[in-house]
Image: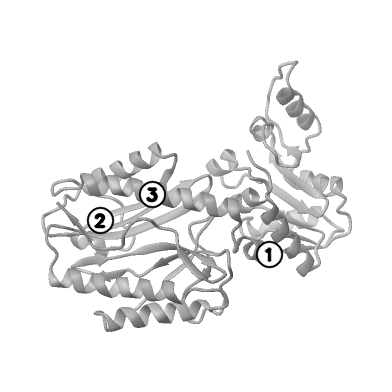
Amino acid sequence: MRGMYPHQTDRLTAALDRAGLEALVAASPENIAYVTGFRSLSQAIYRRTPLFAVFSRQGVALVAPMIELPAIAGADVGTVHAYGEFFLDHEPKGDVSRRVEEWAAAATPTAAEALAQALEALGVRRGPIGLDDTYLAFDAWHRAGERLAPLKVVAAGTYFVEARIVKGPYEIECLDRALHAAEEALNEVIQALRPGMTEREAVTVYQRALLERGGSAYASIIAFGDRSAIPAPYPSERALKSGEVVRFEVGALVNGYYADVARTAIAGAPSERHETFHRAIEAGLTAAIDAIRPGVRGDRVFDAAVAAARQHGLPAYRRHHVGHGIGLEPYEPPMLAAGEDTELEAGMVLRVETPYYLVGWGAVTMMDTVLVMRSGARVMNRAARGLVLLD
């Protein structure tokens, strides 16, 4: 399991410098993974399980419950400080067993005490420190802050957001792998999909194909006919009929990084309406991507997409956004929306989309993943954007 890469170190050090902090303390699963590379299954099962990852100029530390120690022992996560109790026997020989036994012997009763211990070990004694407020309950955040007195504690969720908004080489590689796994798995669905297959069967084909490519699925939407106009439907036993529109919007998770792919298909020959709607949203997506480059505000990209879709066949086209960042979470800043004044930077990875929903008829959709480059934008997708015609 990997530790920190230079990109993450540089981004978080810059956050410390800007805010005048001695340390940043991550609490959300995504921010902990950003600092240490560690992902807790205990926390995934029981989301109130406290974990902390400390980043300082002196080093990194992970605060975790005793149950996670064997999993951490093979990882590069900095120093480890355990809390609570969990009963583990130890093989007398072996580095892993010895390491777990040492950590367990120094365990504190509570997570807050282990966090104080971790900060002390890193030489963080005066503060201020930034404590992640994106995940902890209000009372838990304040209890942790009280235990760290006399250190001054400030809310630090925005500092992690600012650090993570620009991706490093390893992150881009993970996003690329997730995207291509999703595209390849979706292609298997397209090859198999025929009238008579149900939404649930189509989703099962996608999920199985994705697992074969080392990914796991999330939010898999394959919706037929008028059900495609439901923005977030669960798969049903509805069978595909000839002439119907099919909306694909499928996600993948690889190495902790997310990808989304969206395309539209027709079971048979497309109608003029199908072609008009699809042409409009493709024009909107193309215009949005053409507008992406460093220094451009998010609302400029939004305006370009909406104007193009209106000009090319959907004169009343409306959207609340045409995309956002993607990474350790499927929905990250920046937003591509009206009034969004965030300026794009090289290294941002954006999920750009221009769906159109017509309730009672269906939907057409299209989505690409875009890397902001110094000179413009690079589409990371390999899949063609055209309207897919099912045999």
Foreground residue among 207 and 283: 283
Secondary structure under tag 3 reads helix
Which quadrant does the N terminus fall into? top right
Q: Earlier in the sequence, mark 2 or mark 3?
A: 3
Q: Residue at label 1? A: 159
- What is the x, y in percent for residue 311? 29, 84
Q: Earlier in the sequence, mark 1 or mark 2?
A: 1
Distance CA(mark 1)–CA(mark 2): 38 Å
Q: Residue at label 2? A: 223
Foreground residue among 369 and 129: 369
Q: Residue at label 3? A: 182
Secondary structure under tag 1 reads helix
- The quarter of the picture where residue 368 lies is bottom left
Within 10 Å of disc 2 (Cα), the crowding (few <14, some 14-19, many 20+) is: many
Residue 320 visible somewhere in the drawing: no
Residue 95 visible somewhere in the drawing: yes
Residue at the image position 21 percent from the left and 65 percent from the top:
362
Residue type at mark 1: give it: Tyr
Residue type at mark 2: give it: Ala
Residue 128 in the figure: left or right of residue 227: right
Residue at the image position 30 percent from the left and 65 percent from the top:
365
- What is the x, y in percent for residue 217? 40, 46
The nearer-to-camera label among 1 and 3 is: 3
The nearer-to-camera label among 2 and 3 is: 3
- The quarter of the picture where residue 244 lies is bottom left
Distance CA(mark 2)–CA(mark 3): 17 Å
Circles 1 and 3: CB atoms closer than 8 Å = no
Foreground residue among 222 and 48: 222
